[in-house]
Amino acid sequence: MASTDRPTIGVLALQGDVREHVAALDLCGADPVLVRRPAELAAVDALVLPGGESTTISKLLQVFELLEPVRERLRDGMPAFGSCAGMILLADEVLDTRPDAQHLSGIDMTVRRNAFGRQVDSFETDLEFAGVDGGPMRAVFIRAPWVERAGDEVEVLARVPSGPAAGRIVAVRQGAVLATSFHPEVTGDHRVHRLFVDLVRDR
Ligand code: GLN
């Protein structure tokens, strides 16, 4: 495992915007590594689940025999961060997905897939992110989910500030597991990745 200064953080590299997370983690003081095999998962301190297509990643998690190993690491307290499709995968209940899609149950929440609808399925906004200094954060939503139910142990970190979806929950944390509906890996604002790397380092 990594030294405590530069934690080894895996990025699940089955599908999705893996490179963007690798670059952000590197800039935030972690050693990012790609995870495609159980042995690679076993060697990381934490795991990032990228944006992409959750049903495809779900299928590939099974093909690559990673579904149960990731669930087990999450049960053992491994820190994790999921953006967009990654948020969907971390939920324990998903609405509007395929009946055969599998989830990792890292956060006690119900997530609605493609929740923002066809008219506004991709958009950007500035939002307040709890526990992150430096003013509002630019958030990029691409066919994003929202959190429809957050369990008692789940801390709400951000909501949509205005518009038709005002008040919808779009960032959450439960223990060492973080999830955002939007893509902090694509904006060049690395405050969420820094928060995650600090959280991993604290463990
Ligand atoms: N709509 C995608 C899904 O269901 C998520 C989109 C994204 O990750 N940008 O997985």
Image (cartoon, rainbow, N blue to C red):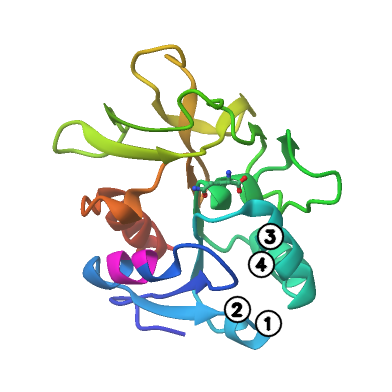
* Frontmost residue, 26 versus 51: 51
Give the CA distance from mark 1 to mark 3.
18 Å
Q: Earlier in the sequence, mark 2 or mark 3?
A: 2
Which of the two marks, 1 or 4, is nearer to us in this view?
1
Q: Residue at 60%, 72% (x, y): give it.
A: 14
Instruction: Answer with mark 1 or mark 4, whichever residue precedes in sequence.
Output: 1
Residue plotted at (35% across, 65% down): 20
Q: Mark 1 vs mark 3: which is more N-terminal? A: 1
Disc 3 target residue? 56
Which numbered tag is attached to residue 38? 1
Q: Secondary structure at mark 2?
A: helix
Dot 3 alpha-carbon crowd within 10 angstroms: few under 14, some 14 to 19, many 20 or more? some
Asked if ligand 1 lies within 8 A of label 4, the reply is no
Cβ atoms at labels 2 and 1 below 8 Å apart: yes
Local packing at callout 4 (Cα closer than 10 Å; few below 14, some 14-19, many 20+) is some
The stretch drawn in magenta includes residue 89: no
Determine whether the residue tagged by mark 3 lies in a helix, strand or loop. helix
Q: CA distance from mark 4 to mark 2?
A: 9 Å
Tell me what residue is drawn at x 57 percent, y 64 percent: 78
Residue at far right of view: 99
